[in-house]
Image (cartoon, helix red, strand yellow):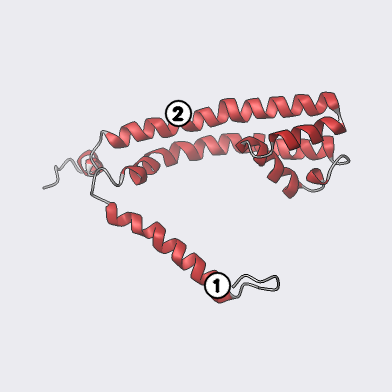
Amino acid sequence: MFTDNFKYTNAEVFLGFGIFLIWVKSVTFFRGNHPYDLMVRTLTVAAPTLMRVVAGVLPYIIGAGFLAITLFWESHDYFKNYGKAQWYVFATQTGDGIFAMFTQMMEANYILGFMFGFCYDFLIISCVQSIFMVVVEDAYVTAKYSKSSSWLIETVGVEPV
């Protein structure tokens, strides 16, 4: 099926997205079953706060991508354009390419590479990801100890039957 010259057609793309959406939609079958819809309720509670945090952090991430381009564009192919720079800066954020990126940045400029790598990783890994974990943990506790119909009680004031 996957040869060297294989090109995806529209049928394969639509089939893949269709299967993906079917699996995503299958989560709704667990709605109302308290132990099984905990993930959906957690994400529902956490989503508004996470979106505000992402909106606040996004300028730092975008700025770090542009800063990486301006500091290290001559050193390696990682920083030739914004898309690649942002991809590799995000890879360091998730812990995938920390050593490779760190050595490439330090080869270009030892002091600036060390400072950029250390400051960015400290800010993102130690601060931002910790905030995300606290928000999701708080939403998990809220969702775990509330009923799935508590929104009805709060908005209408009627206990469901």
Residue at image point 61% right, 38% down: 94
**Label 2 near label 1: C-beta < 8 Å?**
no
Q: Earlier in the sequence, mark 1 or mark 2?
A: 1
Q: Looking at the image, which is closer to me, 141 or 70?
A: 141
Looking at the image, residue 37 lies above or below residue 61 = below
Q: Is disc 1 surrounded by few (<14), some (14 to 19) or many (20+) residues within 10 Å?
A: few
Q: Distance of mark 1 from mark 2, alpha carbons?
A: 39 Å
Q: Of the numbered discs in the image, which one, if any, rests on residue 12?
A: 1
- Judging from the image, what secondary structure is the residue with disc 2 in? helix
Q: Of the numbered discs in the image, which one, if any, rests on residue 134?
A: 2
Q: Is residue 155 left or right of residue 80?
A: left
Residue at image point 62% right, 72% down: 8
Residue 28 found in image quarter: bottom left
Q: Is disc 2 surrounded by few (<14), some (14 to 19) or many (20+) residues within 10 Å?
A: few
Q: Position of residue 67 (x, y in %)?
A: 77, 35
Task: Name the amino acid, label 2.
Answer: Val
Which quadrant: the N terminus? bottom right
